[in-house]
Image: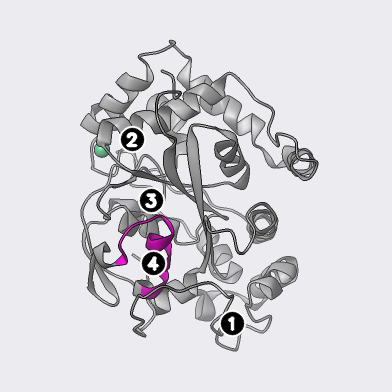
Amino acid sequence: MTTREHPPVRVLFFAGSGRSGTTVVSNILGQLPGAFAAGELRYLWQRGVEQDHLCGCGEPFSSCPVWTAVMTRVRSGDRRDEPAIGRRLLGRLRMARLPGMLLRDALGRQAIPAHSDDAAVTDLYRAIADETGAALVIDGSKLPPYGLLLRQQPGIELYVLHLVRDPRATAFSWLRSKPTRDTAAGAQMQRQETWKSSLLWTVWNLTVLRLWKDGDPRVCRVRYEDLIADPVGELGRVAAMVGADPADLPFLAPDRVQLAPTHSVAGNPNRHDTGEVTLRADDQWRTAMSRRDRALVTLVTAPGLRRFHYPLDTRTQPRRRPNRGVDRGAVSRSATSAGRAR
Ligand SMILES: [Zn+2]
């Protein structure tokens, strides 16, 4: 398949670190007319093709009619060893390679060396757009090097949503055990020790800041806490960035959305939530997290906490970030109680 005769595929890439609320945001934005919430596409080759996890629609990947049609189109070109593409992507994009990527990027060179797999990656987004008719593919992959890889592809027009969440909340979430709801076998989501999740939070969020600058019209930075306090306003800002009408967002009330199933290929188990969903802050960490863990996270993430205007002392409530000179658009603002994004 060649992309030469097509305009590039518009992709909204979620950048940042894990457990930041991207799944529910992807499901909400995926309700916009012409948008397709694909889940975390960097995992498609393994969790979808190789392991046949459940699609967001409830069918196994291999029986979902949408993914069957998409993959048939992807495979119309060269026959590829698809699970190997997934494994090579993990290797090519791993953190140890980050300094080299950032150096090449700073020197104006291609940050991630080209590989024959890149054609398969581009073909995937092209096939999703062609098969579903979507004008916007929403990809919750988050990993900054994967975003860099997408940015390098001429067949992709990349928009970035940098979603940041208080690292004390994400570290607490990483400690909890939760069923993936991806397979019938009852697998649990991966857990991560506090020092490690804190380090990853710092590295990935500061990397996103470096790669996608403030003021770029194709970059939107949103704190999860601000989004929960004002979902209509914050998501309206993101919708406007990608050329959608914020009025088309599926709000039933300022803090409640109506979600139809999406065909997300991987992600947090709440991608399977449909129907009426109330957005509420999940701030159990404030009462249930140990003082030791809290102090450790605060220490390791201190540079990022300062940059994203989170307090070092968590006994105080997070303040709304100051005006960053970003046009908030004409979306009406309505304060809501914060809440758990189920
Ligand atoms: Zn499906």
Mark 1 vs mark 2: which is more N-terminal? 2
Horizontally, residue 45 falls left or right of residue 231, namely: right
Residue drawn at (69%, 71%), measured in percent from left and top?
A: 307
Tell me if residue 118 comes above or below residue 23 in the rendering.
above
Task: Tell me the quarter of the image containing the C terminus.
Answer: bottom left
Q: Where is residue 250 in the image (x, y as percent from the top left)?
A: 24, 64
Label 2 and label 3: CA atoms lie apart by 31 Å
Q: How many C-alpha atoms fall within 10 Å of the one at disc 4: few (<14), some, or many (≥20)?
A: many
Tag 1: amino acid: Pro
Residue drawn at (42%, 71%), measured in percent from left and top?
A: 234
Label pair 1/3, CB-CB below 8 angstroms = no
- Hey, which quadrant is residue 124 in on the image? top left
Mark 2 vs mark 3: which is more N-terminal? 2
Residue drawn at (58%, 58%), measured in percent from left and top?
A: 216
Task: Tell me the quarter of the image containing the N terminus.
Answer: top left
SS label for mark 3 = loop
Question: Which region shows up in magenta?
Answer: 233-246
Which marked residue is nearer to the observer: mark 1 or mark 3?
A: 1
Which marked residue is nearer to the observer: mark 3 or mark 4?
A: 4
Whether ligand 1 has any atom under 8 Å from the Cβ at mark 2 is answered as no
Of 324 and 91, nearer the camera is 324
Mark 3 vs mark 4: which is more N-terminal? 3
Which disc, if any, is residue 235?
4
Mark 4 vs mark 2: which is more N-terminal? 2
Magenta span: predominant SS is: helix
Residue assigned mark 3? 179
Residue assigned mark 2? 129
Tell me which image quadrant ligand 1 sits in: top left
Mark 4 vs mark 1: which is more N-terminal? 4
